[in-house]
Image: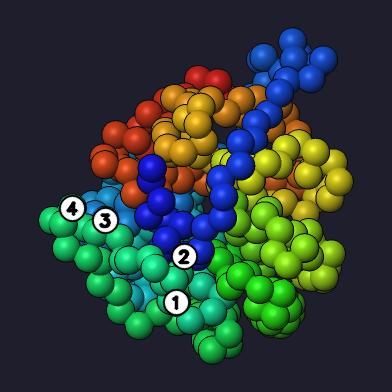
Amino acid sequence: MNSNRRNFLKSTGTLVLGGIALSGKAASLLNFKSRHAVGIQLFTFFNVMDADVKGTLSKISAVGYKEIESAFSKKGGYYGLKPKEFKAMVNGEGLAWKSHHVLGAPFKLPPGAKMPTMPDGKPMTLPPMLNLRDNMQQLVDEAAEGGVKYLVCASTPITSLDEIKLSIETLNKSAELATKAGLQFCYHNHDAEFHEVEGKVPYDLFLAETNAKYLKFELDLAWAIKGGKNPVEMFAQHPGRFPLWHVKDLDAAREEILPVGSGTIDFKPIFAAAKSAGMQHFFVEHDMPKDPFASMASSFSYLSKNLIA
């Protein structure tokens, strides 16, 4: 079971089987294709990118990806670069830098969890990591300096109602500050947000108690499905609130992450509901793959043949 991403960012809950079933409109969806450019989340390359940032971006561009969303780097900052330096490098490879991930609170491992291991078998080491609770203004200023449109909270503590309340306060403050800086602030989910905490579902509280004027969501489709949700129903219930998506695939047991198109998630009805969601950009992501370059190529091949014009 690939749990590195969940252990890296937050505690995990029981993995609930979820899925998407085609409706009566199935026939009309078979030939559906999105007109959005294909993006990729750089966490896919977490174990390799710091060794050759420019080379990794070049390989991403060569496959056909047009947009990127940045994340965490073992070098710190923006893969060891300043925001404007990283933007120049991204643009120089023919890519557009659209979004950046940050932590919602100081990073700490869940109780009993261990740092993920690197390919050499040694525990991962990380530089000091900024977070919204302690470094909100700096993170907003850096994202604005880099010229990205979206700043995304990758995770936030949700193991108790007190933690959820504090997280909601941080998200609302961050969203207002980001809006003043010309950014759209979003929250990214894993599957734990869909499991009850003291009788409440964290994601429901985030939707209800954050300001829809300032805060929107980056829906990780696979984690939502793993959490027992139907993305299409979510879009219908909260139209326009999901401008960003993460696209990854899962095996039948909803345990192993796979390249897009090689698992069991039916993406056609989800992409057909993109307008209802308010989707503006989507990013392929594969958490800690054995071969990130093979995975990204496989995902792009499927998307280009089935879901994009």
Cβ atoms under marks 3 and 4 closer than 8 Å = yes
Q: Secondary structure at mark 1?
A: loop
Query: Of callouts 1 and 4, which one flags the residue occurring earlier in the amino acid sequence?
Result: 1
Q: Which residue is mark 3?
A: 47
- Above or below — where is 163 with respect to 137? above
Q: Amino acid at mark 3?
A: Asn
Q: Farthest residue toward the left?
A: 120
Query: Of callouts 3 and 1, which one flags the residue occurring earlier in the amino acid sequence?
Result: 3
Q: Residues within 10 Å of mark 1 (few under 14, many from 20)?
A: some
Q: Which residue is mark 2?
A: 9
Q: Amino acid at mark 1?
A: Phe
Residue 21 lies, in percent from the top left, at: 71, 23
Question: Gap between marks 3 and 1, in whole Å?
Answer: 18 Å
Q: Which mark is residue 119?
A: 4
Question: Gap between marks 3 and 2, in whole Å?
Answer: 15 Å
Query: Of callouts 3 and 2, which one flags the residue occurring earlier in the amino acid sequence?
Result: 2
Residue 113 lies, in percent from the top left, at: 38, 65
Q: Which mark is residue 107?
A: 1
Q: Is residue 54 something that shows in the picture? A: no
Q: How many marks?
A: 4
Nearer the observer, disc 3 or disc 2?
A: 2
Q: Residues within 10 Å of mark 2 (few under 14, many from 20)?
A: some
Q: Which mark is residue 34?
A: none
Q: Image check: 2 left or right of 168?
A: left
Nearer to me, 269 or 178: 269
Question: Where on the picture, by quarter, is residue 141?
Answer: bottom right
Q: Secondary structure at mark 3?
A: loop
Nearer the observer, disc 3 or disc 4?
A: 4
